[in-house]
Image (tube, rainbow, N blue to C red):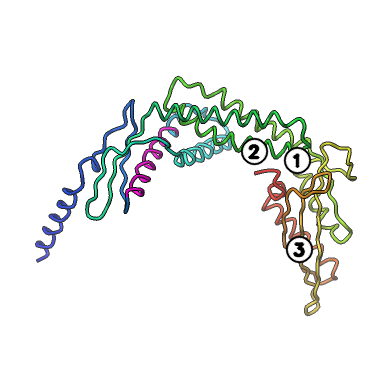
Amino acid sequence: MLRFFFVVGIMLTLLVHAEIPSWVLNPPADDNNHFYGVGEGDSMRMARDEALNTIAAKLSTSVASTLSKNATQSTLGSGLIFNSTTNQQLSSEVKKITFSNYNIVYNAVENGRTYVLVKVNRNQFLAEKKEEIADLEKEMANLFSKLKSKEILERFKILKDITQTAERAKTLVSIVASLDPSYQKEPHLNQYVLYKLKLDDLLDEIEIYVAADNESRYFADVVREEFAKEKIKTSKVARRDNPNGVIVEVEARPTVREIYGRYIAKAQVILSLKKRDGSIVVQNSIEAKGSSSIDADNAIIAASKDFAEILSQKGLLMLLGLKD
C-alpha cells in the first residue's frame, strides 16, 4: 500500500512538471543583448513583478561581484568591515531598481498559477540609467548653486538633500559600471564624495547657542556636554549677526513626587532646533526619569543623567536632524 502511494505521488509530481512550460524550468540565459527573468504568481501582474525582481536580483549579484573585484582590501579591520557593509547596502538598493521598458516573451496559466518570461533590452536599459544619472547630477548641481545666498541651516538642508540624491545616483553608477566595462565611474563617485565632505565641513562651521531657563538648566548642561563630545562649537550668547549661529532650545518641566520617603522625578524635555529668527526647524520630545532618597533637586539631577543616557543612545545630532 505504501509503495502504491509512493508511485502515485511520483506520477502526480511528474504530471505537474509536465504541465509547466519548459521555459519556466529552463529560462534563456542572459546575453549581450537581453536580461531574462521568470516569474510566477496568482495574476499576470504578480508574475511579471516577480520576473522583474529576478532580473534586479541578478543585477545586484553582478554589482556585488564587480565591487569585490575592484575593492581595495584595507589592512585595518574597521575599514574592511565598513567597505563590506557599504557594499551590502548598495546591493540591497540595486534589488529595488525599476524597469520602465520590458517585454513579456511568454506567458501561461497552469494549475491556477500564472507564469511569465520577461526580457529587458540590455543596451536600452543602460541608456536609460545613464540618462537618469545625468538628470540626478543636474539636479544636484542646481541645488549646490543655491548655497551661497542661504543661511547655514538652509545650506545644511540643501546639502543633505544633495547627498541623499547622490546615494541614488551612486546605485545607478554602480549598475552601469558593472555592465559596461568602458564606463568611467570614478568622476561621478568622486563628485558625490565632495558633496558629502562639504556637508561635513558645514557641520564644523555651525555655532550653537543652547537656550534654557533655570528650570531646565541641568538638562541644558547635558546638551552642551553632548555637543562638546561631538566637537560642535557652542556659544554663550545668541548673536543675531552670526551667519553660522543656530539656536537649540531646551525646555524641561520636571515634576517630583515623594513616595515612601523617596523622591521620584519625571521630565518631558523638548529639544528645538531653531533658526536665528526663532523659527523651529526640528523638534523632538524625550521623557526622562530619576529618583533620589535625598531631596527633589537630586531626583531631577538623576533624571538629567537618564536624559544623558538617552541622548547618547539616540544621538543628539540625529535627534536634531544634523546627522543621518
Which of the two labelled residues, at mark 2 and mark 1, occupies the earlier sequence position? 1
Quadrant in the picture for the C terminus = top right
Where is residue 294 drawn, in percent x and y?
84, 71
Check if mark 3's residue and mark 2's residue have beta carbons within 8 Å: no
- The residue lying toward the viewer, choosing from 210 and 83, is 210
Q: Could you tell me which residue is drawn at 28 percent across and 50 percent down?
A: 114
The question of residue 45 being in magenta is answered with yes
- Other residues around mark 2 within 10 Å, as few (<14) / some (14–19) / many (≥20): some
Q: Which mark is residue 268?
A: 3
* Disc 2 target residue: 161
Three-letter amino acid code at disc 2?
Answer: Asp
Q: Mark 1 points at which residue?
A: 153
Mark 2 to mark 1 CA distance (whole Å): 12 Å
Q: Quadrant of residue 10?
A: bottom left
Secondary structure category for the residue under label 2: helix
Residue 35 percent coordinates (x, y) = 34, 33
Residue 125 at x, y percent in the picture: 41, 30
